[in-house]
Amino acid sequence: MNILITGCNGQLGNEMQLLEEKNPQHTFFNTDVSELDITDQSAINEFVNSNKIDGIVNCAAYTAVDKAESNKQLCQLLNTEAPGFLAEAIEKRHGWIIQISTDYVFDGTKHTPYVETDRPCPNSVYGSTKLLGETEVVNHCKNAMIIRTAWLYSIYGNNFVKTMIRLGKEKSQLGVIFDQIGTPTYAGDLANVIMVAINKGVYPGVYHFSNEGVISWFDFTKAIHRIAGIKSCNVKPLHTKEYPTPAARPAYSVLDKTKIKETYGIEIPYWEDSLKECVERLKQ
């Protein structure tokens, strides 16, 4: 198949590229904004048709959660309208699209893991635009797969793991939120399951994916420092109200992964095992 990857310079896009040489049966077109502006509908149509694209993995998004609150127009363009353009273009070629979404489509007031049939209720601009993006994709392409993920990190780009390692080395003390609960997702693991879906066949619908286990940001930071060998930084727990941000975060955003595990016959790594792998790669 000819497969278009958008957002190839991001965390997930970079991890996808590492898997491409192991899948030589496909031709991958890796694009970021300089190669393809996904907010330009005519440019998308031209690219998809001229390269005979069979499927799209949309890794591109506006992910600056706090900035989104004051930059709604751009956020909506990238997270809502652009996915619709991509879905519409690939539908005309009878192809498929995998759209990456987020745990922010939920407000986090539940106390058991979110399943795909739970009613979304975002409480941020980022979450709202991503949810509308899901709707646009499903409305414009019959073979649309939505994968909601959470707490994404990798060796690429800016993310929580790299920031905590840097701050742990720079500071003697850190305060980290302890009353927001979720599950980290190693972008390498998400890329693997996307490649499984490509090779086994894209089954339309909404799916949840993160690593296994449950943790707070505070405990995650403690684990990052322990695994990275950082001993000089004292990490203290903070309440969410002690660290106000423009965008509201879900207090509880654990995702139930039963559907994607049963559909594709996969096992998902435990969060700490994947964290160790990432830290080891960062050291190298």
Image: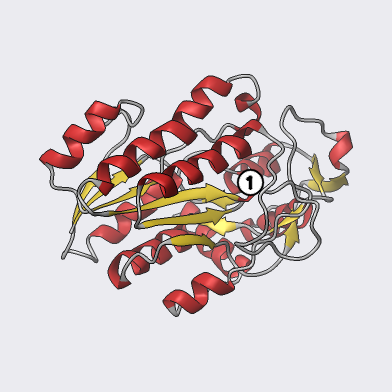
Q: Return the x and y of residue 179 as percentages of the image width and height.
A: 84, 50
Residue at the spot 65% in from the left edge and 25% down from the top edge: 69
Q: Quadrant of the C terminus?
A: bottom left
Residue 125 visible? The answer is yes
Rendering coords of residue 233 (x, y %): 77, 46
Residue 59: horizontal and vertical position, in percent?
41, 45
Q: Is residue 15 left or right of residue 163?
A: left
In the displayed structure, does residue 152 sit left or right of residue 229?
left
**Mark 1 burial class by Cα count in 10 Å: few <14, some 14-19, many 20+:** many
Q: How is the image coloured?
A: secondary structure
The residue at the point 73 percent across, 41 percent down is 249
Q: Looking at the rendering, which quadrant does residue 213 occupy? A: bottom right
Please report the residue visible at 67 percent of the width from the left and 42 percent of the height from the top.
169
- Front one among 111 and 18: 111
| Residue appearing at x 66%, y 49% in the figure | 120
Which quarter of the image is occupied by the N terminus? bottom left
State the image quarter where residue 242 is shown.
top right
The secondary structure type at the circle numbered 1 is helix
Looking at the picture, does residue 213 appear above or below residue 126?
Answer: below
Q: Is residue 35 visible?
A: no
Q: Quadrant of residue 104?
A: top right
The vertical placement of 172 against 39, above or below, is below
Q: Which residue is mark 1?
A: 105
- Which residue type carries mark 1? Val
- Name the one closer to the observer, 256 or 19: 256
Looking at the image, is 74 positioned above or below residue 85?
Answer: above
Residue 143 picture location, percent across and down = 34, 57
Across the whole image, how many numbered discs are drawn on residues?
1
